[in-house]
Image (tube, rainbow, N blue to C red):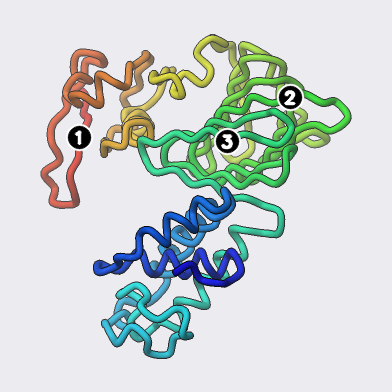
Amino acid sequence: MKPDLPIHDAALHWALQTGEPDFADWDAFTAWLEADPAHGRAYDAAQVALDEAAALVPASETEPVAANDNAPGWLSGGRAWLGGAVAVALVLATTFLIGFWPQGEALYVTAPGETRLIALDDGSSVTLGGGSRLAVEGARAARLESGQALFTIRHDAADPFVLQAGATRLVDAGTVFDVRMVGTALDVAVAEGAVIIDPGKQDVRVDAGERAVGTGGVFRVDRFDAASVGEWSRGRITFQNATLADIAADLTRATGTSFISTDSATRLSGSIALDAVKADPRALEGLLGVRVRPRTDGEGEGWVIAAR
């Protein structure tokens, strides 16, 4: 039965319920999701919030207990990991939800290997890459929290589109640009128009056919093939002077298959069709001239990329 609750409370309810191994009320859950597009966004945010909350609960406090111990009635039957720390974890989850979902803001989260097209109210759009998180506020502002996104923006000089990527503020002065963020490293490539990085401070202008790469707020602008901007959204990734560790991370996000590399010295440039790698990860050996072997360190499944 669909809970008669505010959207965020209902999202947290369903995130808890669907995490149970014996959950069976899929018809009601599906009906709730389909009732409003905002429900799916709220559910994604709740899942992320619960995962974040779980990571903060000490392992010694996550012993299984009765599912309704110390929990409000509507939350009975919650995730087993809540255990004796159910009250603490629920407070943490609620706190994370408030942070992830300010009033008027929508959070989008993608799994590795997944892409998602987000239509903005003014006709603009964002293609969100795998393993990414993007918060959107209305049609003219967004915040990239991690990963990569391709922005196709309806330019309006009187009301420019503003993107916050970590500590860096980007203002659209054009129409099509790609942003990739890993930790404090930021990569901005422009296909059409221009993007201004930190206007009023650094005022770094990136025009069509240029790419700005920066770490810690210091950017270098180079020429870049405008046609390759956002290629990952069309099934191909292109990289220039990238380390094997960075290439492995990009492949993981783009394909959903786990790749790792401890090699931060070897650098390569090239272009890879993702379908070939999805079909056979060892195809990278011929494409990049590297060694690819199954992961055997006991830390999970996947593939290790190493220089020959």
Q: Residues within 10 Å of mark 3 (few under 14, many from 20)?
A: some
**Corner quadrant of residue 224:** top right
Task: Say which of 222 and 301 sits in front.
Answer: 301
Viewer-nearest residue: 227 or 79 = 79
Identify the residue under disc 3. 118
Q: Secondary structure at mark 2?
A: loop
> Which residue type does callout 2 highlight?
Arg
Q: Left or right of 193: which side holds 270?
A: left
- Percent position (x, y) of residue 232? 44, 23
Nearer the camera: disc 2 or disc 1: 2
Q: Earlier in the sequence, mark 2 or mark 1?
A: 2
* Element marked by disc 3: strand
User: Which badge, 2 or 3, is on the more N-terminal residue?
Assistant: 3
The kind of residue tagged 1 is Val
Tell me residue 218's x, y (percent). 63, 33
Q: Nearer the viewer, mark 1 or mark 3?
A: 3
Above or below 179: residue 33? below
Q: Position of residue 272 (x, y in %)?
A: 33, 16
Q: Residues within 10 Å of mark 1 (few under 14, many from 20)?
A: some
Which mark identifies residue 154? 2
Q: Nearer the viewer, residue 33 or 148?
A: 33
Which residue is under mark 1? 304
Q: Quadrant of the C terminus?
A: top left
What kind of residue is marked 3? Ile
Q: Horizontal placement of 46 versus 18: left or right?
A: right
Q: Residue at x 19, y 13 (%)?
A: 286
Return the disc, 1 or 3, that comes first in the chain's sequence.
3
